[in-house]
C-alpha cells in the first residue's frame, strides 16, 4: 500500500520525559489526521522509553526510535531519516503545538507549492505567557539573526538536499539549517496565528546565557560564518560599511535615550 502520511512530527527527547505526555497530547489533538509522530530517545537516562511506548500503544501514528546520545541535531536527523512524511515538523519534547497547526501547515504548502518553510507566530508558556516576537523574514536578515522558531515545517526533500542538520553544532542548529535550505529567492509562509507553543524555562534568557559563556556563542557565530563565508561575502561585501552603519545606529539610539520625551515615555510605561 502506498504511503499516505503527509507530515511527520519529529520529537527528540533527552532528560525531559516529565514534559513528554503533554507534548504528545498536543500532537494527538490535531484536527489534521494524516500525520505520524516519531519520538526519538536520544540516549535519555530517564523513563522516556516507558512513556513513548505507552503513546505508541495508544495510537499507531506514534513511532519510537532509541539511539545513543548524540545531541539534538543528531536526534532530529535520525527521526527524519525514519520518517515517511512529505513535510517535516521538528518539535522539542518540552513544547506544544496548537490543535490546528498541522492543518494550517499542510494547507499552506498545498496552496503555495513554491514555499520552502512554513512558520507561525509563537506563544510562550511556563515562565512567561507573552508572545515571542521574531524578526520578519528576509534572507539577508536570517544570515545575522534567526527569524523562525525551530518548530517550523519544511519539505523532507529540502532536508535531503543539504544532508540534514549539522551535528557538529551544540546550539543554533536550526538557524544554520535555515541558512542552507533557503536562498535569496526562497519563499516562506508565516501563519498569522499563534501556532507554536514554546516553553519558557526559569533558568534565564538567552542574553543571560550569552553573558555567562560568551566564548561558546561567539564560537558558534564564527563557525557559521566560516562555513558560509561565500554567502556572507555576497550579502555583506564590505564589513567596514556594516560596522559604520552599526555605529551610526548606536549613536542615534543614545541620542534618542537622552531625549526628554523618551525619558517621560519610559517613566509612564513603568507606572502603567
Image (cartoon, rainbow, N blue to C red):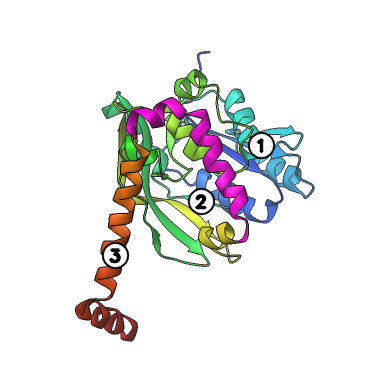
Please tell me how crowded label 3 is: few (under 14), some (14-19), or many (20+) other residues with Cα within 10 Å: few
> Which residue sits furthest top?
1
- Residue closest to the eye, 103 or 256: 256
Indicate which disc, 3 or 1, sits on the residue closer to the N terminus.
Answer: 1
Q: Is residue 121 magenta?
A: no
187 on left or right of 66 = left
Which quadrant of the figure has residue 138?
top left
Whether residues under marks 1 and 2 lie with C-beta atoms below 8 angstroms apart, the answer is no
Q: For the residues carrying marks 2 and 3, which lies nearer the camera in this image?
A: 3
Q: Residue at x 63, y 55 (%)?
A: 19
Please tell me how crowded label 1 is: few (under 14), some (14-19), or many (20+) other residues with Cα within 10 Å: many
Span colored in magenta: 212-237
Task: Give coordinates of residue 65: x percent, y percent.
Answer: 69, 32
Which quadrant of the figure has residue 42?
top right
Task: Give coordinates of residue 40: x percent, y percent.
Answer: 66, 37
Which residue in the structure is indicated by mark 3? 253
| Dot 1: element | strand
Please tell me how crowded label 2 is: few (under 14), some (14-19), or many (20+) other residues with Cα within 10 Å: many
Q: Is residue 222 magenta?
A: yes
Above or below, 209 against 266 in this view is above
| Dot 2: element | strand
Q: Residue at x 57, y 65 (%)?
A: 204
Which residue in the structure is indicated by mark 1? 40
Which residue in the structure is indicated by mark 2? 96
Indicate which disc, 1 or 2, sits on the residue closer to the N terminus.
Answer: 1
3D distance between C-alphas at marks 3 and 1: 46 Å
| Dot 3: element | helix
Amino acid at each position: 500500500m502506498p504511503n499516505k502520511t503527509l507530515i511527520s512530527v519529529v520529537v527528540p527527547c533527552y532528560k525531559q520525559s516529565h514534559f513528554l505526555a503533554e507534548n504528545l497530547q498536543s500532537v494527538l489533538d490535531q484536527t489534521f489526521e494524516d500525520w505520524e509522530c516519531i519520538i526519538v530517545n536520544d540516549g535519555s537516562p530517564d523513563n522516556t522509553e516507558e512513556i513513548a511506548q505507552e503513546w505508541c500503544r495508544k495510537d499507531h501514528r506514534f513511532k519510537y526510535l532509541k539511539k545513543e546520545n548524540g545531541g539534538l541535531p543528531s536526534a532530529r536527523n535520525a527521526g527524519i531519516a525514519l520518517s515517511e512524511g512529505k513535510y517535516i515538523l521538528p518539535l522539542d519534547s518540552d513544547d506544544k503545538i496548537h490543535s490546528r497547526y498541522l492543518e494550517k501547515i499542510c494547507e499552506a504548502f498545498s496552496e503555495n507549492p513554491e514555499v520552502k518553510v512554513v512558520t507561525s507566530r509563537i506563544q510562550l508558556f511556563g515562565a512567561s505567557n507573552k508572545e515571542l516576537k521574531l524578526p520578519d523574514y528576509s534572507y539577508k536578515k536570517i544570515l545575522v539573526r534567526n527569524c523562525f522558531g525551530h518548530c517550523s515545517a519544511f519539505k523532507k526533500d529540502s532536508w535531503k538536499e543539504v544532508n540534514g542538520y549539522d551535528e557538529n553544532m551544540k546550539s543554533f542548529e536550526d538557524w544554520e539549517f535555515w541558512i542552507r535550505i533557503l536562498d535569496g529567492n526562497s519563499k516562506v509562509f508565516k501563519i498569522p496565528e499563534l501556532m507554536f507553543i514554546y516553553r519558557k524555562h526559569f533558568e534565564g534568557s538567552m542574553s543571560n546565557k550569552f553573558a555567562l559563556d560568551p566564548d561558546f556563542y561567539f564560537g558558534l557565530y564564527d563557525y557559521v560564518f566560516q562555513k558560509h563565508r561565500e554567502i556572507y561575502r555576497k550579502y555583506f561585501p564590505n564589513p567596514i560599511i556594516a560596522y559604520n552603519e552599526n555605529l551610526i545606529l548606536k549613536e542615534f539610539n543614545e541620542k534618542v535615550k537622552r531625549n526628554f520625551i523618551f525619558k517621560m515615555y519610559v517613566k509612564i510605561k513603568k507606572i502603567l
